[in-house]
Image (spheres, coloured by chain):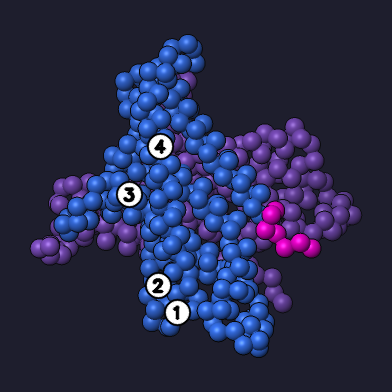
Chain colours: A purple, B blue
Amino acid sequence: MTYSLNFAAVWRSFDLLLQGLALSLGLAIVAILAGCVIGLVTAFGLVSKSSVLRKPAGLYVTIIRNTPILVLVLFSYFALPELGVRLGKIESFVLTLAIYSGAYLAEVFRGGLIAVPPGQREAGLAIGLTEMQIRTSIIIPLMLRNVLPSLGSTMISLFKDTSLAAAIAVPELTFEARKINVETFRVIETWIVASCLYVATCSLLAALMRAVERRLAVPR
Amino acid sequence: MDFGFLDQLWVARVPLLKGLGVSISISLLSIVVGTVLGVFVGLALTYGYRPVKWLVRGYTDFIRGTPVLVLVLASYYVLSTVGIDLGPFQAGILALAVFCSSHVGELVRGALQSIPKGQTEAAKAIGLTFPQTFAYVLGPQALRQALPAWVNTAAEMVKASTLLSIIGVGELLLRTQEVISRTFMSLEFYFFAGFLYFVINYGIERFGRYVERKTAVPS
């Protein structure tokens, strides 16, 4: 074993890694925003009294949660064009990630919705709010506070899942790392730096979520 | 999907079945190795002396902060660079087992910490040594806590096994891609592979629910 560490080559391409990281974060942010909307709508479907809404919502969640995300990524990039849906790499990946995270977030939100005491809705009805007003101004805010911890961990795992975009050659962090790896042969250094970037970003996201949780905690 | 797909499926049955077999072996191997490692990680996180605890915490946090795909790629490329000649299959299993161990470690820690202190105290009061306490009092209760989540981890591992296709392990997804590159039936074959994974994972999920019901504390 005569390998000596030399980070110089990796530092020279460090801006590429940072660009990749920025794209990873961008993919994650767009996907989580879209995923939250999908998840919220699905969660209301999951807790709905009518089975016409409940069944399809449940089916969507079950199918997506039990399929490997790599299969979904490849499917939407390579197979959807056969159905006439032609998307670019980035668009198809973000779409996949949004649909994927939507299924996980739906479960998260469902748990949060169930935990909102029914008295809150009744109080809303008592002061004459419509069903929609009750949802947007009472139930969703209360639910969000309930689910902040799981929302945070879903966000972090979603950020890590952006690495799969490398499989369809989206130039995010993992793809750039792989490129540098091939070009410079500084194998160990590249992967150390890339992993550290991921770990640092994840820790930052976790700290951010903890700060939000503290700020929104119910005062007692 | 017309008759052509079924024909092609029949032609491709052998590689696809072999791929499925490889996928299942990857999952089983990484779950077994990862669980054994993970139990030690969990024990160290709960009962380790401070330096050990910090070391293991650093390990789990680092692994959990890194995407599985990065672990797989790093394991494959790094090990061969330092002269450890593992094939993609072994390197991939190692990466998945390490990933699994960090999850199982957290799971074991959570389960052990959720057992009320009174249980340990009661065991002490009747004169059990720590190994006895663990074997008769803490272990069984922790197992009940951790089992449903562990089954979920197993489903995670089946899904993560697809990532080994990227380093060229001939598991189901790679075999599917090869079939597609010959037949150009991407819609049908991706759908088929997705369906197989769904069936396996749905089975595991249902099994997890069953385990949860069976091991629930009767109230």
**In this image, B7 relative to B130: left or right?**
left
Mark 2–mark 3 Cα distance, whole angstroms, equals 22 Å
Residue closest to the eye, A132 or A203: A203
Residue at mark 3: chain:
B
Residue closest to the eye, B159 or A208: B159
Structural crowding at the residue carrying mark 4, measured as other residues with C-alpha within 10 Å and reported as few (<14), some (14–19) or many (≥20): some
**Residues in magenta, as a range:** B213-219
Residue at mark 4: chain:
B
Residue closest to the eye, A199 or B62: B62
Q: Position of residue A32 (x, y in %)?
A: 52, 48
Mark 1–mark 2 Cα distance, whole angstroms, equals 9 Å
Mark 2 sits on what residue?
A: B56
Mark 4 sits on what residue?
A: B21
**In this image, B124 relative to A209: left or right?**
right
Classify mark 2: helix, strand or loop.
helix
Q: Position of residue B52 (x, y in %)?
A: 39, 79
Which residue is painted at 58% across and 40% down in the image?
Answer: B202
Extreme residue in the top direction: B3
**In this image, A52 relative to B7: left or right?**
right
Mark 1 sits on what residue?
A: B48
Q: Position of residue A75 (x, y in %)?
A: 44, 31
Say whether disc 1 or disc 4 marks the residue closer to the N-terminus.
Answer: 4
Mark 4: amino acid: Gly
Q: Nearer the viewer, mark 1 or mark 4?
A: 4
Say whether disc 2 or disc 3 marks the residue closer to the N-terminus.
Answer: 2
Mark 3 sits on what residue?
A: B92
